[in-house]
Image (cartoon, rainbow, N blue to C red):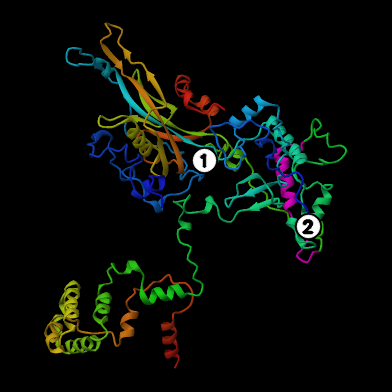
């Protein structure tokens, strides 16, 4: 690059403010002997002697601007002045298709892209938050029963035994079962002998869960709207069936 | 996020169409004659069932529904000044009416002077700005660069697309005025030029595309919609650069000398103000009762923007017996944001509705009535 453009605005020269040309006021001491170009000083200097302060102020350099047609996402258009040489600008995201400005537009609500089905698989395996307070009581209770890993074999033993013995408890309501099972959780830490009695009384007749993995996998309710491919578990099941 | 009481939050709360400050904290007892007995008028629909406006009316209102109750039956009451502390109140019925408006969707057209002024400013700006540097925006010999150069050559070297053939640094730079009858400053012509310029002229390989193989840019929708062309006054996407007002046609039967006679009038949705109700609450209730709940409306303020008085008819003999009570109608301003009017099952004997501009209102409304509300309208 060469020199700067000559049209750039110059700094105002300090030559006119030297103390030799202007009478210094006694009550305004300045550090370097140079007085600041305030309005007060300029009036005093003009009174003392004619000094030209008017400098050439060139027009500021502005970039070249085009007229551009902007098309919003709903098809409406308007023109703007811009430095872009494109004649037409099509906006992809603006207030016409944004949820903040279009709160009633339902199609803008969920923008989850899940082509590989990974999110769906995760949700199938671990569930989503609102499944917890839903009516999926037995699964949740069962999962809770298996939660402490150390007590898991104990609980499995207890439920198996109860499956053999406790046929009388089948007619009980689901809610009671749930509550009683939670009691079992609390007592699982104690020796198994102590936990036997309530487990016999309360546990359901059949226990569909064989292992810890199955318990966790049934934690979520089934979601029919899953996009994408199979989850890893389903894939494994399919392969088993093929064999 | 925003915690301001915007329209979205009001919707989510499922509240009535007044703001929380306007709404009264205590539940109001409603009088049985005009309570919301039908379920469709009882509450605002949930969020999911709302539609956007510019939709056509849900069902055509060709079949006039029989009015369930005549709003203002001619009553005969005798003024008894001794018992009534304020006899003036008995003379008038107080009504509240909502002037529901749709704001303009488009910026208005430029006047010839405006477009000429903007054009002059553009050519003046051409003389004052730095020149356009093509190399700054386009890499040399890329497809975009070739494309721009082709179009630049067609414009005789003028980088701007909308100022015509004008060289600000040449010998004829002073000659910046248009000849009479030139369309260069016309905004529609400007859009045409920009759309023509947006067309791709060079393929990705840098080969010029033949004229028959070029893909023209899709034109934006015209300013006049289909409803404008067809003259459909019920759609909301008509007259898009004007404010539209909702008027409804009220029909009632009148017995004149033993003969039943059908009368009809065009007016804004109007209803009686109940004892425990303020004007804006009544207006919000009336618009729900008459035009359905399938609208996202907003009552602008609590102060009426206009009023209309019909004098009571007093018996000539002595002037003590009121033959017909007068009405004082207060108009509030409302805005529609989404939805469409639906007169099915309304309680006010309404048979038809229209979305009209101010000039069209003048033809439809009674003259006195129009003169009362004229002051709140756009005077452009």
Residue B344 percent location from the top left of the image:
39, 41
Residue ID at (16%, 73%): A176
**Closer to the camera, B282 or A53?**
A53
Q: Residue furthest bottom?
A: A243
Residue ID at (53%, 36%): B233
Quadrant into which the C terminus of chain B falls = top right
Q: Which secondary structure lies at badge 2?
A: helix
Q: Residue B179 magenta-drawn?
A: no
Q: Which mark is residue B120?
A: none
| Residue A216 visible in rendering | yes
The mark nearer the N terminus, 2 or 1, is 2
Residue B66, placed above or below residue A167? above
Q: Which residues are magenta?
A: B183-206
Q: Chain of mark 1?
A: B
Q: Which mark is residue B147?
A: 2
Q: Chain of mark 2?
A: B
**Closer to the camera, A165 or A99?**
A99
Q: Which secondary structure lies at badge 1?
A: loop
**Closer to the camera, A36 or B364?**
A36
Q: Report, in whole angstroms, how far the alpha carbon at label 2 lies from the one at label 1.
A: 42 Å
Mark 1 surroundings: few (<14), some (14-19) or many (≥20) residues within 10 A? many
Residue B332 percent location from the top left of the image:
40, 30
Residue B306 percent location from the top left of the image:
42, 24
Q: Residue furthest right?
A: B171
> What residue is disc 1 on?
B236
Residue B28, picture quadrant: top left
**Closer to the camera, B61 or A63?**
A63
């Amino acid at each position: 690059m060469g020199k700067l453009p000559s049209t750039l605005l110059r700094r105002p020269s300090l030559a006119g403010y030297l103390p030799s040309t202007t009478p210094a006021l006694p009550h305004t001491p300045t550090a370097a002997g140079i007085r600041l170009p305030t309005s007060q000083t300029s009036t005093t200097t003009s009174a003392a002697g004619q000094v030209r302060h008017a400098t050439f102020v060139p027009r500021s350099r502005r970039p070249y601007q085009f007229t551009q047609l902007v098309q919003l996402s709903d098809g409406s258009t308007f023109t703007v002045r811009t430095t872009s040489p494109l004649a037409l600008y099509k906006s992809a995201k603006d207030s016409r298709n944004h949820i903040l400005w279009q709160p009633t537009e339902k199609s803008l609500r969920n923008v989850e892209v899940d082509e590989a089905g990974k999110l769906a698989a995760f949700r199938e395996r671990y569930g989503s938050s609102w499944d917890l307070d839903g009516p999926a009581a037995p699964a949740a209770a069962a999962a809770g029963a298996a939660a402490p890993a150390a007590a898991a074999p104990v609980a499995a033993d207890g439920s198996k035994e109860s499956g053999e013995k406790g046929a009388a408890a089948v007619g009980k309501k689901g809610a009671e079962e749930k509550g009683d099972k939670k009691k079992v959780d609390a007592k699982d830490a104690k020796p198994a002998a102590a936990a036997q009695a309530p487990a016999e009384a309360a546990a359901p007749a059949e226990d569909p869960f064989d292992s810890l993995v199955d318990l966790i996998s049934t934690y979520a309710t089934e979601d029919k709207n899953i996009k994408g491919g199979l989850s890893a578990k389903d894939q494994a099941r399919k392969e088993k069936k093929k064999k | 996020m925003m915690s301001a009481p915007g329209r979205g939050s009001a919707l989510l709360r499922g509240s009535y169409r007044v703001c929380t400050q306007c709404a009264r904290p205590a539940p109001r007892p409603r009088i049985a004659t005009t309570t919301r007995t039908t379920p469709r008028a009882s509450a605002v629909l949930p969020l999911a069932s709302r539609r956007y406006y510019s939709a056509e009316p849900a069902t055509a209102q060709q079949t006039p529904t029989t009015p369930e109750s005549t709003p203002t039956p001619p009553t005969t009451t005798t003024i008894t000044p001794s018992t009534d502390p304020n006899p003036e109140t008995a003379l008038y019925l107080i009504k509240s009416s909502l002037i529901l408006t749709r704001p303009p969707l488009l910026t208005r057209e430029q006047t010839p002077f405006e477009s000429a002024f903007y054009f002059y400013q553009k050519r003046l700006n051409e003389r004052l700005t730095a020149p356009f540097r093509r190399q700054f925006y386009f890499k040399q010999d890329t497809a975009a660069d070739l494309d721009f150069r082709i179009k630049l050559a067609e414009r005789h070297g003028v980088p701007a697309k909308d100022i015509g053939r004008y060289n600000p640094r040449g010998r004829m730079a002073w000659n910046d005025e248009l000849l009479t009858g030139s369309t260069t400053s016309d905004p529609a012509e400007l859009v045409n030029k920009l759309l023509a310029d947006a067309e791709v002229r060079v393929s990705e390989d840098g080969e010029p595309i033949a004229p028959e193989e070029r893909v023209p840019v899709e034109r934006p929708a015209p300013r006049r919609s289909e409803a404008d062309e067809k003259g459909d006054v019920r759609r909301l996407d008509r007259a898009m650069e004007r404010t539209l007002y909702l008027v409804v046609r009220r029909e009632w039967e009148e017995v004149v000398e033993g003969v039943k006679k059908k009368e009809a009038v065009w007016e804004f949705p109007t209803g009686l103000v109940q004892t425990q109700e303020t004007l804006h609450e009544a207006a919000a209730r009336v618009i729900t009762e008459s035009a359905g709940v399938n609208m996202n409306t907003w009552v602008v303020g609590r102060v009426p923007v206009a009023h209309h008085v019909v004098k009571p008819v007093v018996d000539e003999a002595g002037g003590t017996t009121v033959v017909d009570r007068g009405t004082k109608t207060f108009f509030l301003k409302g805005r529609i944001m989404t939805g469409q009017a639906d007169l099915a099952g309304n309680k006010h004997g309404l048979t038809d509705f229209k979305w009209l501009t101010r000039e069209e209102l003048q033809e439809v409304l009674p003259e006195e009535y129009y003169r009362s509300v004229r002051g709140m309208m756009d005077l452009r």
